[in-house]
Image (cartoon, helix red, strand yellow):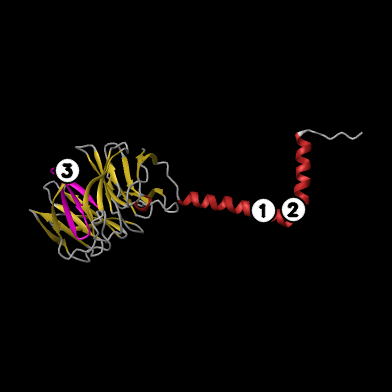
Amino acid sequence: MFQQDSSPFFSLKLSNKIIMKTFNKQTLRTIAATFILSLLFSGFVSAQSYFSDKIEKYWQTKAVFQVPESVFYDIENETIYVANINGKPTNKDGNGFISQIEPTGRIVRLEWLAGLNAPKGMNKFDGKLYVADIDRVAEIDIESRKIIKFYEADGAEFLNDVIADDDGNIYISDMSKGSVYRISEGKITEWLPAKTFDHPNGMYYLDGTVYLGAKGKIVSIDPKSMEIKTLAEFDGGVDGLEIDINGNFIFSDWSGKVQRISRGGKPEVLFNTTENKIHAADIHLIRKENILLVPTFFDNRVMAYKLVK
């Protein structure tokens, strides 16, 4: 009398026979090829959106912001401000606002201050927060959370990043016009004329020198002599620009790539989330802790990454 083998091996052989009867050889080849291609494609996507061993994820907020373009860490108040465009970057619609979050990523006030159009770069001096707002700069009293005044920049087209020097002069890049504006002694003027740079954006101030990122390069500007020197060159543009404690430049390209470069060196990619459609707009580095803050624009979050040695 025939007795059916109930072992797993027998079941597997039986299953294979059923599969072979159900599918012909060509069908099986097609399934195998599709599986291999899917693995290769997954590897390609992973390679395009990788994180190097020089950086690791720290925290991220929920996706509750409205087109966050820039972040700024207020050391004195231990607060991170987030500029929300809340619409299109060029629309004067009054929808823009500033959020407040803790260095841990906890959201304190989603709408810390309203009444802006499309806020972008931010910086602070003497208790005042200065925010680029298309063709004007808002001066905000941090303690009272009120807009003190707007500096209307004559001829400005697309004011973007903002920095402050030791004397309280405020510098603002105009990406469309290729110029730099400056607020000094209560007045805003065009400090460097139109077409001085190709798509200038990210700026940084350190030890008496203004640094600026434009298309394909990072330059230094001497505020006294107005001498401009090219310090680093690369492919692509610059959105946010920071300098780490070792003097290296860290910059984002808006689309999702963040790189680090030394003077005269070659850029190294810290991470690239372009393929994942997670943007990297106007970044900010908390230098003491080596924590990089990244607003993700359409992704509506703020990400924090730890730079490791």
Q: Is residue 243 left or right of residue 255?
A: left
The magenta-colored residue range is 120-144
| Residue 178 locus on image (x, y percent) | 23, 63
Residue count near mark 2 (Cα–Cα under 10 Å), binned few <14, some 14–19, many ≥20: few
Contact, mark 2 vs mark 1 (Cβ under 8 Å): yes
The relative height of residue 1 versus residue 182 in the rendered view (above or below) is: above
The relative height of residue 209 versus residue 196 in the rendered view (above or below) is: above
Query: Which tag, 3 or 1, sits closer to the chain's start?
Result: 1
Q: Which residue is mark 2?
A: 23
Q: Residue at x 42, y 41 (%)?
A: 53
Q: Which one is in front, 289 or 276?
A: 276
Cα distance, mark 3 to mark 1?
Answer: 62 Å
* Res 246 → quadrant: top left
| Residue 94 locus on image (x, y percent) | 23, 56
* Res 88 → quadrant: bottom left
Mark 3 falls on what kind of element?
loop
Q: Which mark is residue 142?
A: 3
Residue that extends furthest to the left in the rendered view of this protein: 185
What secondary structure is the magenta-colored segment mainly? strand
Contact, mark 3 vs mark 1 (Cβ under 8 Å): no
| Residue 258 locus on image (x, y percent) | 36, 50
Q: Which residue is mark 1?
A: 31
